[in-house]
Amino acid sequence: MEDILGLLTPALLNSSIRLATPIILAALGGAICNRAGVLNLALEGKMLLGAFLGILGAFFFANTYMGVLVAVMAGGLLGAFFAFVYLKYDVNLIILAIAINLLILELTVYMMRILLGNVGTWSDPSIQKLPDIEIPIIQDIPVFGDIVSGYNIIVYLSWFLAIAGYVVLFHTKFGRHIRAVGENQDAAEAVGINSRRIQLFALVISGALAALGGAFLSIGHLTLFTRNMSNGRGWIGVSAALFGFSHPIGVFLAGLFFGFADAFAVRLQNVTDLPPSLIQVLPHFATLFALVLVALREKLSLYMAKRRSSAALRSGSEAATAD
Amino acid sequence: MTNAVEMKGISKFFASSNVQASSNVDFSVETGEVHALVGENGAGKSTLMNVLYGLVEADEGQIFIEGKEVKIGHPDDAIHHGIGMVHQHFKLVPSFTIAQNIMLGMEPSQYGLLQPKEEEEVVRQLADKFGLPVDPSARVGDLSVGMQQRVEILKSLQRDIRILILDEPTAVLTPQEVEELIQVVRGLTELGQTVVFITHKLVEVTKVADRVSVMRGGKMIGTKKVAETDIPEMARMMVGRDVLFRVEKEAANPGEVVFEAKHLTVLSESGVPAVKDLSLQVRAGEILGVAGVSGNGQSELIDAIAGIRPVEMGSLHLENDSLDGLDVSARRDRGVAHIPEDRIHVGLNMETSLEENALLSRENHPDYNRWGMLIRSAVRKFASSIIDRYSVASATPEGGIVTLSGGNMQKVVVGRELAGDPKLILANQPTRGLDVGSIEFVHKTLIEARDEGAAVLLISVELDEIFSLSDRIAVIYNGQIVGEFAANEATEYQLGLLMAGGSLDQEESAQKKTPAEALP
């Protein structure tokens, strides 16, 4: 037991934050889509595309930041394609997302073979990892500095985007229009808001965010690409968006929670005799647990509403008989 | 004085449903008046107003706003010309505050950021100006329906509307809210607004309107000053005849109580009680008609009896056996038949053939099923018998149900439900949307079933239908039975009063009977 408690170190929080970053980015994208009333289940595919094109861009331009840019633009374009097919041809969002996820998974393997002559895992010594940035002054604060400083640009960007997402959604005209479209499209259109444009924007942004998360995997965290590198993180992002009630700050915390579960599972393998495969399931149990909580909260509020009205009813009929 | 609105020769034909919704209609509204537009369902009121608001494009006709001819192809054009419309279904965002809803699309912002204080101040001033007090920071989802309607009205006014169309604004309101709305509408005209008030409740017309225009069958029948007309005259113009159309029928010969609901409470979709402590009885060989404005708990009542919706409190009995805890098919086995309100989605399966629809819920009956396999020939014979008996036009057992007209679809539903001599027939708006011939057929069939001893519980929002079929009439309002009459003792006026949430206290109370007394 003491071994397990011994795991709770700044180093564990460091790796939690790193593992949380792609999830947070995907989840922010998912949250914006939820707010705009378009369910985005293609985050997984968009993240994988970002991971693949990120490392490819870094290799060809011999510049890691160019790799990040390529990934973000590709993710945005894929989001725009998704939006185009949905808004123009009214294709079912779930089927479309499944198709895109499967397509990207196989397409990346195919392109690896064609471009790089390689099927399993690809890397090249010329590719530089995104550098870690130490924040002056803050890095010198004991413990806090260790936890907050020393990450690459994408990690800091994910923090900034969570705050920016909150400001945009709740304190700008545009964000309010997004929420209006998501909650009652008729109401938004009745006052002249172009709901299609808003949904297009949400899908493009979410594609770019998920792809940024993917780039973090291939050139931020490691410098290699493997088949199915996103490995379910896009799906965990979908869950984190729900668990965080599609609120950017809530989504950020939900992402951290999943990152922590991930990091904790990795550390746990070193100190216990439990089979590693069992421990690797732990983050997914965390996801399940989170979604059960979300579902229970909805059930509970419905149940409370029913109880309130029944109680009101009973006291009402008692009053009537008393008359 | 120029008219605020002048519509000339408006015609509109809907090819999809083959309906001439509007034929050469002239309609004018004077500036500053409340103009009531009345007519039965399908008379063409909504089409006319949708043309004015740019939701429907007319085939022919001209529109003049404040003397100038205009083209209105989209609601944005209408708003531009100062025309606003409050629909029956509000277009509001529930999680937003009142101020956020009113200012949606025209929010003040500074350096890209919203200004909630300024927004609320604008709304407060607007509310003061028109004497419609609201709390700008209240969440719209927490408001009563009447308050939400007020928000919609304010939303229009904020967009500099001078001509406000209210589409059946009282259909969803409580009587107190109706009174308030009438005050609000009168107040608006004092401030120079012009209001078109669509309704089919004539009592409201006399309270709120300066003039009234009556439509029937897509034609404008006439426009009168409200002070120079009365309810019977308006009703005559609306219906087109003095005497109500009645089906010929023998006097009822009621037997034992077949069905009884005791202290029934049923919750609506949103968890609030839609049926409240309601009790009623139906006897063998009689039709109990439940009259009421749509949305007063009728559907929840029928669904609860049919077993589709759970009963919150109270009990249901069929011939002294409790129905509580039985599922839909168990209730059907015991003799409950259900002609649902929505034949397209609930009554029938549009994807499949007439015979499969006719068979629904009898799939396990030994006549049609042997060792888990359907006996096609028997099924076909059964379907053919329905086609013959109810003269379902241009139908074959194998043909898709979707090819039939509404009236013929309903005949299949009625045929299926009445086969096997049900003890209790739940008929929820059985003739909604049907043509006159089909209506007559359904009515006759229900009366035949009654004469053969079935207990019939009829729900209808059409008073004509209630009067022509019922042996007893109950009025449902706000989930409760607020009055019961023997059919020959009820008047349309009394029912209308009760349906609108009024009371008969000022009337001779002898007319009003408690449920126990009303039973023969």
Image (cartoon, rainbow, N blue to C red):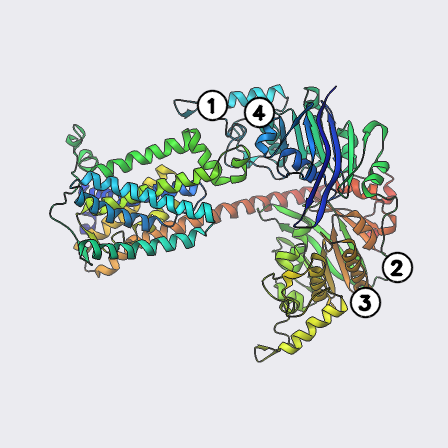
The residue wearing badge 1 is B108
Q: Amino acid at mark 3?
A: Glu
The residue wearing badge 4 is B158
Q: Which residue occupies the foreground of this view, A97 or B110?
A: A97
- In the rendered structure, the residue with mark 1 lies on which chain? B
Q: Relative to B152, does residue B423 appear above or below in the rendering?
A: below
Distance from disc 3 to disc 2, alpha carbons, whole Å, reads 13 Å
Q: Which mark is residue B452?
A: 3
Mark 2 lies on a secondary structure that is loop
Visible residue check, residue A244 = no
- In the rendered structure, the residue with mark 4 lies on which chain? B
Distance from disc 2 to disc 4, alpha carbons, whole Å, reads 58 Å
Question: Is disc 4 in contact with disc 1, using a CB cutoff of under 8 Å?
Answer: no
The residue wearing badge 2 is B251
How many C-alpha atoms fall within 10 Å of the one at disc 1: few (<14), some, or many (≥20)?
A: some
Q: Which of the two discs, 1 and 3, sits closer to the camera?
A: 1
**Which of the two labelled residues, at mark 1 and mark 2, occupies the earlier sequence position?**
1
